[in-house]
């Protein structure tokens, strides 16, 4: 079962890495446009300029209709490009920017959390040392 999960985990890690870097996300988007345009150019026998224009219009899901695939290869490519953009790239871009807007300025950094845990352990050790040997709570029974 672990053998089957390994590729899924690697894909997930790759998506997280991609989503956390705006530069990488933009490069991936541009790469999809260029590769999609190049494949479209070959499959549909179109010029490079027309093919890149088609890729931009298709990836943005605008679909002007001025350039569209007529071969089955081109149509498969269009489906893959649209699906990749709508189901993967656009949500990753949206999630990245949303996570930047939702950052809690009062949240503790990792180093601060570790310092707090260390201090709590020290306080617990002091409390145990103070209460060692006494049967009741620190300070003894209340006066009446």
Image (tube, helix red, strand yellow):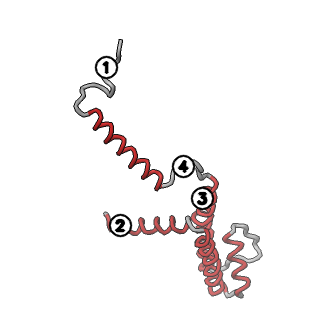
Which residue position is annotated with label 4? 107
Which residue position is annotated with label 3? 95
Above/below status of 31 relative to 20? below
Which residue position is annotated with label 1? 141
Q: Where residue 2 appears, x then y in whole percent? A: 32, 64
Q: Where residue 44 appears, x then y in whole percent? A: 66, 84
Calculate the distance from the C-alpha at mark 1 to the C-alpha at mark 3: 57 Å
Above/below status of 32 relative to 20? below
Q: Residue furthest top?
A: 144
Q: Earlier in the sequence, mark 3 or mark 4?
A: 3
Name which residue lies at 60% across and 50% down: 105
Which residue position is annotated with label 2? 4
Calculate the distance from the C-alpha at mark 2 to the C-alpha at mark 1: 63 Å
Q: Residues within 10 Å of mark 4 (few under 14, many from 20)?
A: few
Do callouts 3 and 4 mark residues in contact (Cβ within 8 Å)? no
Do callouts 2 and 1 mark residues in contact (Cβ within 8 Å)? no
Q: Where residue 67 appears, x then y in whole percent? A: 74, 77
């Amino acid at each position: 079962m672990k053998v089957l999960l390994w590729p899924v985990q690697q894909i997930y890690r790759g998506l997280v890495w991609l989503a956390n870097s705006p530069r990488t996300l933009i490069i991936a988007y541009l790469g999809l446009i260029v590769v999609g345009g190049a494949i479209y150019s070959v499959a549909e026998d179109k010029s490079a300029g027309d093919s890149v224009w088609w890729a931009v219009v298709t990836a943005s899901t605008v679909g002007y209709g001025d350039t569209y695939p007529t071969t089955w290869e081109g149509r498969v490519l269009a489906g893959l490009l649209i699906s990749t953009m709508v189901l993967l790239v656009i949500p990753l871009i949206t999630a990245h920017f949303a996570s930047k807007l939702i950052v809690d300025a009062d949240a503790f950094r990792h180093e601060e959390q570790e310092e707090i845990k260390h201090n709590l352990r020290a306080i617990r050790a002091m409390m145990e040392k103070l209460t060692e040997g006494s049967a009741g709570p620190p300070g003894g029974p209340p006066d009446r």
